[in-house]
Amino acid sequence: MDQNIIVRDASPDDKKYAETITTEMAESAKARGTGIAKRSPDYIRTKMDEGKSVIAVTPDGTWVGFCYIEAWEDEKYVANSGLIVAPAFRKSGVAKEIKKMVFALSRKRYPDAKIFGLTTGLAVMKINSDLGYEPVTYSELTSDEKFWSGCKSCVNYDILMSKDRKNCMCTAMLYDPVEKLSEEKAKAEASIVVSREPIPHHKRRRKFAENFKLFERFMRFKQFMMLKGWRKKDNEDQDEEKRSSILSFLFFW
């Protein structure tokens, strides 16, 4: 990442960037041919006031990127939402730094919450995987209706509803702090029982980075089949959620 870019917690002083942020969110969604929950400048300003967002800027005050936190189901679930980077700074590594910081902020403010995300972006999936997220089925995400109503602004909303909200073009990913703690305890116990060092977790699974191109092809195939199935309903009863979760598991592990 460019050393001149500053990534930090956003503050009320950053409200001047709210209009620029929401405009870029809308333009980016339009360019991708997909959508995200539409947010108003006032909503972004509220996140800055609450200390629930991360911003990236240059020393001269040029806006670079942004991401914010949303909590659901009485803070049982947390989403790192609205990740956006200004076009001139994309592919600079700043998105990864923003995600890392907003993830750390989420863990600090909501240490017991499950952190999740929905995305069609392969680069974001890679970043999430590096942070410890795992691909999951939609049923493992929040059931809060307010969260799902945010999908109404996406061009793929009809597909989501046609799948009974069990699957869509996005990949669901989740970080479960309880599960991660159990893994760490299991590793610690194994190191005591076994005389040799246990095989590191990252070596027991197939790294996402090593299979990025393969996963990219899978995602394109999934989206193609989903669009095809939406336009022409299958005669057979298929469990889309189970099939998608199994394929995701194979590609990530």
Image (tube, rainbow, N blue to C red):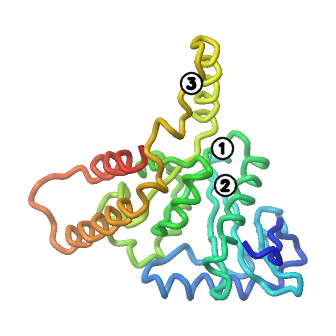
The residue positioned 55% from the left and 61% from the top of the image is 147
Q: Quadrant of the N terminus?
A: bottom right
Residue 136 lies, in percent from the top left, at 44, 48
Q: Nearer the viewer, residue 179 or 6?
A: 6
Amino acid residing under circle 3: Pro
The residue that disc 2 covers is 71
SS for dot 1: loop
Residue 10 lies, in percent from the top left, at 83, 69
The label shown at residue 113 is: 1
Spatial separation of the CA atoms under disc 1 and disc 3: 29 Å
User: Which mark is in front, 2 or 1?
Assistant: 1
Callout 2–callout 1 Cβ contact below 8 Å: yes
Spatial separation of the CA atoms under disc 3 and disc 2: 36 Å
- Disc 2: CA contacts within 10 A as few (<14), some (14-19) or many (>=20): some
Q: Earlier in the sequence, mark 3 or mark 2?
A: 2
Is residue 160 in view?
A: no
Q: Nearer the viewer, residue 132 or 48?
A: 132
The residue that disc 3 covers is 198
The residue positioned 63% from the left and 29% from the top of the image is 184
Q: Earlier in the sequence, mark 1 or mark 3?
A: 1
User: Which mark is in front, 3 or 2?
Assistant: 3
The residue positioned 46% from the left and 82% from the top of the image is 32
Question: Is 178 placed above or below 224 here?
Answer: above
Q: Nearer the viewer, residue 34 or 194?
A: 194
In the picture, measured across the screen, residue 233 lies left or right of residue 66, that is left
